[in-house]
Image: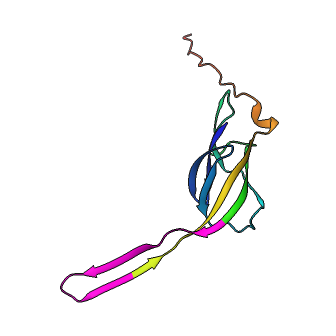
Amino acid sequence: MNAIVEISGKQYTVTEGDRLKVASQLSEVGNILTFDHILFANDGKKDHVGTPTVKGATIQAKVLEHGRNRKILIFKKKRRKGYQRKNGHRQGYTLLQIEKIEFSAANKKTLKIPAKETAKEE
């Protein structure tokens, strides 16, 4: 089973057991987070495409650690003007482990699309 989930405005492709670095989440280490903004899911038999999300699908992830990424340098300069600015930034992250991808019973029903009817001339 795999899915495409949106977490903090970014989309990630996940399967059960994956480890994932996402933007900082407000949760303690060891807690279980539940995400329900699933855009696409595959249960092994059938693809479920969300419109815009898959109804009844959830992903449970365990918080493993919090940390900060490597430093990114920002350097601005205007030539011949004596203007230089150097700045650095370290973005915080949360490391998640995907525990479960679940579907509710309501999502298992199939969508039936009616066949096109041709116009009859009278």
Locate residue 11 relative to residue 61 in the image: left or right.
left
The image quadrant that residue 55 belongs to is top right
Residue 85: percent from the left, percent from the top? 34, 84
Residue drawn at point x = 65 percent, y = 22 percent: 114
Residue drawn at point x = 23 percent, y = 89 percent: 82
Quadrant in which the C terminus appears: top right
Residue drawn at point x = 20 percent, y = 82 percent: 79
Most foreground residue, 18 or 26: 18
Q: Residue furthest top?
A: 122
Q: Which residues are magenta?
A: 66-86
Locate residue 93 relative to residue 31 in the image: left or right.
left
Q: Is residue 112 above or below residue 86?
A: above
Residue 50 in sight = no
Residue drawn at point x = 61 percent, y = 69 percent: 67
Most foreground residue, 72 or 76: 72
Residue 80: percent from the left, percent from the top? 18, 85
